[in-house]
Image (spheres, grey):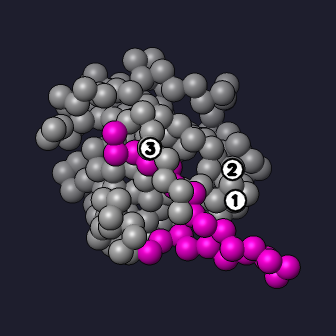
């Protein structure tokens, strides 16, 4: 597996080894011991979302009970984003994005303390998330997908949004942000 560090400390792009032959291909999406060595231990929940072209989901995080997320795409293409939302972090409000697709097999590791979101670039996309904490509705938080202080270039003019994402606060106004622990 190829491990690519991003400009945000802790956020990784992973390229699993692909074994191809005349029958097709095989790859490991997750192997507990190997991924634990990268700080991804304790996966407790696996989620699957299907979204249409132009859908933006995010920017989501959970606090308290933060989730680390290993994200990959089984069908289609998304622009996947992580934003540092840890109060006191030297990277606070900075973001990094990567194209994840069924063709490139890349994965994104978004550690606890980062908000996550994506925009669907194909007709539809099936996105999987392996999470380190169970979903807790009372802990769900969001930051505005189009917060000008964050400045994500989604390359999109008219996104499809949930009411929750449409009404999410700016990062400067977001309550209960996680704390940076150095």
Residue 102 is labelled as 1
Element marked by disc 1 = loop
Q: Quadrant of the C terminus?
A: top left
- Label 1 CA crowd tier, 10 Å (few <14, some 14–19, many 20+): some
State the residue lying farthest toward the top.
148
Q: Residue at x 38, y 75 (%)?
A: 32
Mark pair 1, 3: CA separation:
21 Å
Q: Which residue is mark 2?
A: 77
The mark closer to the camera, 3 or 2, is 3
Residue 126's quadrant in the figure? bottom right
Task: Name the spot of residue 179 as percent of width and height, x first.
Answer: 16, 38
Residue 136 is labelled as none
Is residue 116 in view from this perspective? no
Q: Which residue is mark 3?
A: 5
Q: Residue at x 19, y 51 (%)?
A: 64
Q: Which residues are magenta?
A: 9-31
Element marked by disc 2 = strand
In magenta segment, residue 66: no
């Amino acid at each position: 597996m190829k491990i690519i560090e991003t400009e945000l400390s802790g956020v990784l792009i992973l390229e699993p080894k692909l074994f191809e032959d005349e029958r097709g291909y095989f790859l490991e999406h997750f192997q507990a011991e190997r991924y634990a060595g990268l700080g991804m231990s304790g996966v407790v929940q696996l989620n699957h979302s299907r979204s249409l072209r132009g859908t933006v989901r995010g920017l989501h995080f959970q606090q308290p009970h933060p989730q680390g997320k290993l994200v990959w795409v089984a069908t289609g293409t998304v622009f996947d984003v992580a934003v540092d939302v840890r109060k006191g972090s030297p990277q606070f409000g900075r973001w990094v994005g990567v194209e994840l697709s069924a063709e490139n097999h890349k994965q994104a590791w978004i550690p606890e303390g980062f908000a996550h979101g994506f925009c669907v670039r194909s007709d539809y996309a099936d996105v999987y998330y392996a999470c380190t904490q169970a979903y807790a509705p009372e802990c769900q938080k969001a930051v505005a997908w189009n917060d000008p202080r964050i400045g994500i270039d989604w390359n999109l003019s008219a996104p499809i949004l949930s009411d929750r994402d449409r009404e999410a606060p700016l990062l400067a106004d977001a309550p209960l942000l996680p704390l940076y622990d150095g």
